[in-house]
Amino acid sequence: MKTPFIATFTFKVLDPLQDNEYVVGYIFFSKTQNIDPSDQTSYFGFLQVLYTNPDDHINLNVAISFLLNAGFVKDDKIYCEAFTGNIGGYTDLLTGKSYISGFSPYTSGVKSFILP
């Protein structure tokens, strides 16, 4: 049976968290290496994860169906980058576009893989 997942991303926060503190991580997916969370045209989709335990890690499985629904096709080279920070955002009611800001300048770096 073919696995429905293409990749697993592991989140681990190295800085200690206070009680009731959490970190939200985002992974953005694009067809180019130039991923900018504040520019919705630079990526096709994103996933988010809530991280609450500094002594553990979280594995986030990326489903092939998610990538296909986001607009990727078989054999596409997909670039991805993980971000976190003091994140906020809003949706422009006139255009329907969502804008996200407040990301840390420290990211996972851009990674890539081929969609089978």
Image (cartoon, rainbow, N blue to C red):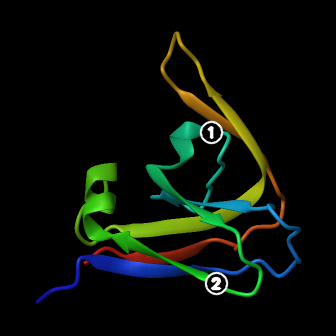
Residue at the (70%, 73%) spot, across then down: 108
- Residue 2 coordinates in the image, percent (x, y): 15, 86
9 relative position to 3: left or right: right
Give the quadrant of residue 104.
bottom right
Looking at the picture, which amino acid does disc 1 mark?
Answer: Asp
Disc 2 secondary structure class: loop
Dot 1 crowding, Cα within 10 Å, few <14, some 14–19, many 20+ = few
Position above or below: 6 against 90: below
Quadrant occupied by the C terminus: bottom left
Q: Kindly identify the amino acid type of the residue bearing the numbered disc 2.
A: His
Asked if residue 12 lies left or right of residue 6, the reply is right
In this rendered view, identify the residue nearer to me: 27 or 88.
Answer: 88
Label 2 Cα neighbours within 10 Å, binned few <14 / some 14-19 / many ≥20: some
Q: Circle 1 — which element?
A: loop
- Residue at image location 27% in from the left, 72% down from the top: 75
Mark number displayed over residue 24:
none
Of circles 2 and 1, the one toward us is: 2
Q: How far apart are marks 2 and 1 (CA)?
A: 29 Å
Which numbered dot is residue 57? 2
Q: Quadrant of residue 27?
A: bottom right
